Image: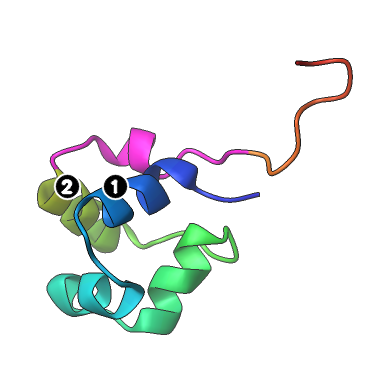
Amino acid sequence: MKRTRLIEARKNAGLSLRQLAQQLGISKSLVVSIENCRCNPSWEVAQRLERFFGIPAGELLAISRDEPEPGGE
């Protein structure tokens, strides 16, 4: 599972993991963990993401499955 909307927003902004981390004032490893659903961001970090990208945190942090649901197309 990944947070594909967050990954897309970062890539569309032309930012590396390190660059986004610097913009948000967090570590690169935390960005990786958030994108890969290994942890949830604090409320403060979620708000920074929302302000930075101009996208509601709920959309940015929605979890997408890597594989389609069984029986789904």
Please provide percent x and percent y for residue 27: 33, 84
Kind of residue sitting beneath label 2: Phe
Q: Is residue 65 left or right of residue 20?
A: right
Q: Is residue 50 left or right of residue 64?
A: left
Please provide percent x and percent y for residue 4: 48, 45
Q: Secondary structure at mark 1?
A: helix
**Which residue is depicted at the point 18% across and 70% down?**
24
Q: Report the magenta residues as a range.
A: 54-64
Residue count near mark 1 (Cα–Cα under 10 Å), binned few <14, some 14–19, many ≥20: some
Is 57 within the magenta? Answer: yes
Please provide percent x and percent y for residue 6: 37, 49
**Which residue is depicted at the point 40% across and 53% down?**
7
Residue of label 1? 9
Residue count near mark 2 (Cα–Cα under 10 Å), binned few <14, some 14–19, many ≥20: some
Name the image quarter holding residue 29: bottom left
- Mark toward the viewer: 1 or 2: 1
Picture layout, residue 31 above or below residue 9: below
Please provide percent x and percent y for residue 11: 31, 55
Q: Depth check: give the residue in front, 19 or 35.
A: 19
Residue of label 2? 53
Q: State if disc 2 and disc 1 touch (CB < 8 Å).
A: yes
Picture layout, residue 23 above or below residue 63: below
Kind of residue sitting beneath label 1: Ala
Distance (Cα) linking label 1 and label 2: 7 Å
Q: Is residue 20 left or right of residue 37?
A: left
Q: Secondary structure at mark 2?
A: helix
Q: Which mark is residue 73?
A: none
